[in-house]
Image (cartoon, rainbow, N blue to C red):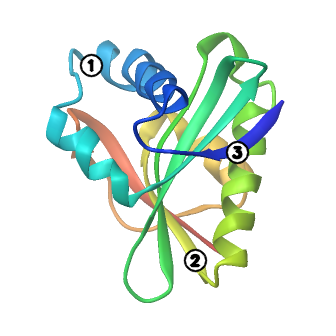
């Protein structure tokens, strides 16, 4: 498995968008808008590949005060629980740490809270609704 930073608009990015659409949006009856995808130019785009096949992805977006936000974490359904997500998290955290960030934060879907807790994240605050489903803010000090 190769973990790497990919370029917005590249062929690899198109694979990333399709993966996120299939895993995160279509099950909710949602899709990405052109504006949403255009705004991702400001994100660091991270993906895991096996040869030409995308296995998983996530994005990092700088926030205020030494915090970076993890967004759009997705792993192929048949590979969930097989270490791809953990490898992506470690890679993203190392990049954030190397760039001087002190904490990483995310809006975690309720069904993913257990995974993030296993890799050291803590729930911060009350449940809220986002993209029609329950989420929690989660954070980890780097």
Q: Crowding near pointer 3: few (<14 within 10 Å), some, many (20+)?
A: some
Label 3 and label 1: CA atoms lie apart by: 28 Å
Nearer the viewer's eye, disc 3 or disc 1? Answer: 3
Above or below residue 102? Residue 128 is: above
Q: Which residue is mark 1?
A: 28
Label 1 and label 2: CA atoms lie apart by: 30 Å
Image quarter of residue 22: top left
Q: Which residue is mark 3?
A: 4
> What secondary structure is found at the residue carrying circle 1?
helix
Where in the figure is residue 12, as x and y percent of width and height? 55, 29
Picture quarter with the N terminus: top right
Question: Tags 3 and 2 in contact by the CB under 8 Å rule?
Answer: no
Above or below residue 31? Residue 92 is: below
**Numbered mark located on residue 103 in the image:** 2
Picture quarter with the C terminus: bottom right
Observer-nearest residue: 110 or 104? 104
Residue sitting at 36 percent across and 60 percent down?
42
Image quarter of residue 57: top right
């Amino acid at each position: 498995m190769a973990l790497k930073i990919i370029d917005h608009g590249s062929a690899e990015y198109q694979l990333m968008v399709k993966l996120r659409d299939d895993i995160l949006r279509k099950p909710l009856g949602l899709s990405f808008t052109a504006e949403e995808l255009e705004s991702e130019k400001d994100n660091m785009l991270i993906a895991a590949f096996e040869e030409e096949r995308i296995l998983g992805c996530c994005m990092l977006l700088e926030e205020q005060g030494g915090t970076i936000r993890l967004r759009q974490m997705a792993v192929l359904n048949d590979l969930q629980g097989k270490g791809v997500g953990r490898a992506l998290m470690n890679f993203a955290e190392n990049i954030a740490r190397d760039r001087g960030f002190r904490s990483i934060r995310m809006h975690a879907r309720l069904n993913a809270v257990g995974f993030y807790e296993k890799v050291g994240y803590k729930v911060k605050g009350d449940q809220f609704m986002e993209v029609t489903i329950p989420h929690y803010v989660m954070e980890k000090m780097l």
